Amino acid sequence: MNRLTGRLRHNADREWEQDGLPQLVLGGATLIMLLGLLVPVLWRPGIERSWYITSPALIAWGVILLRYKQILLWLKSRLTFPRAGYSLPVFLGAEAADPRPGTAENYSITDVRATPAPELDRRQQVWNRVLSALIGVFAFLNLFIPGPLQPWFFPFWLLVVLLLIARTAYGRTPLTLFAAALASVLLYFVFRFPPKHHILMVTACFAAGLSIDGAVSLVLFLRRHPRTTA
Amino acid sequence: MNKELERIAGLDRLIHEPARLMILFLLSSCDEADFTWLQNQCGFTQGNLSGHLARLEGAGYIAIEKSFRGKLPLTVCRLTRDGQAAFRAYCSCMQQIFNSA
């Protein structure tokens, strides 16, 4: 019986990711950040002026990632829940067996949602920490280091970090992401970009890979679940 | 009465019904779920599912919150603490019966 519950729980968790929206939100957020970093590179204004473009994009990225769950719920409640129904996986809600006093009836659904499960809490902590470090490094590399950097260190370090982010964010690393990682390494060998630009290129590959994965999953999901009239 | 048979007699009949057992299994696999999701998973008709949910709610095993999403009704169900305890007790009882069989 425990095995059956475990399998059902695994299915419910997997369903959360099947519609592709987690990937799309993550890919979209990264594209916004990328826009903020690419515009100064393309326009090449002074450092002070490029901050005006980069900062809002980085702030928007941070806000999207910090409000990740709320944005996902908002999108899902409009796109996928009306078609396939709504179920909140245990890792996003509160463990009902949590040792708080009282009975579950005393809590509203908002209360239940407000307390993350330990697993999610841990994931979010890792996620936020890695992303904060990444934002800082991106801003630093893009704006304050004019000369060439160590040629191998940053692309591969970044690759590992990006894969880690994807893994932490929604529990799996899609094939498109590996393809994007491979593409970025190949492009590095073909074009021999300076490392500073290559970092942007790796991010572009990552964001594109995620967005494509999300968009394809979403289209397939919507085709599998046609809208039913209530 | 034989102890093993006593266990069988002590099974919670409300949970023992296959449709309601299915619903409890599904609700124990997630934090909360709506009517459409349960219907998709179980394959019951609306009336059938509604009846079983009402019985489980009446026993205090599940909590149902009815609201509206735009103009569409939204019925969200979740397992209560009593429901979890009863479901766990039922599973453990069944396990013991199978082990002794």
Image (spheres, rainbow, N blue to C red):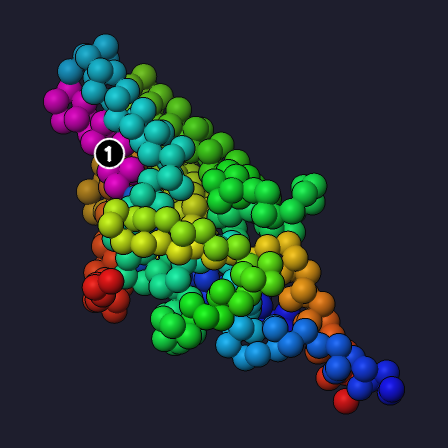
How far across and down, in percent of the image, does residue B4 sit? 82, 84
Q: Is residue B63 left or right of residue A75?
A: right
Residue depicted at 44% across the width and 58% down the height: B33
Residue depicted at 64% across the width and 60% down the height: B84
State the SS at label 1. helix
What is the quadrant of residue B45 in the picture?
bottom left
Tell me which segment is drawn in magenta.
Answer: A27-44
Query: Quadrant location of the C terminus of chain A?
Result: bottom left
Q: Which chain does the numbered disc 1 sit on? A: A
Evaluate whether residue A189 shows in this view: no
User: Can you say whether B27 is above or below A146 in the image?
Assistant: below
Counting the numbered discs, the total is 1
Q: Is residue A178 left or right of residue B63?
A: left
Query: A193 or B94: which is nearer to us?
Result: B94
User: Can you say whether A176 is above or below B15 in the image?
Assistant: above
Evaluate whether residue A208 shows in this view: yes
Q: Does residue A41 show up magenta in the picture?
A: yes
- Category of crowding for the residue at label 1, using alpha-carbon neighbours closer than 10 angstroms: few (below 14), some (14–19), many (at least 20): many
Residue that lies at the very extreme toward the front in this rendered image: B58
Residue identified by numbered label 1: A32
How far across and down, in percent of the image, does residue B50 sit? 42, 68
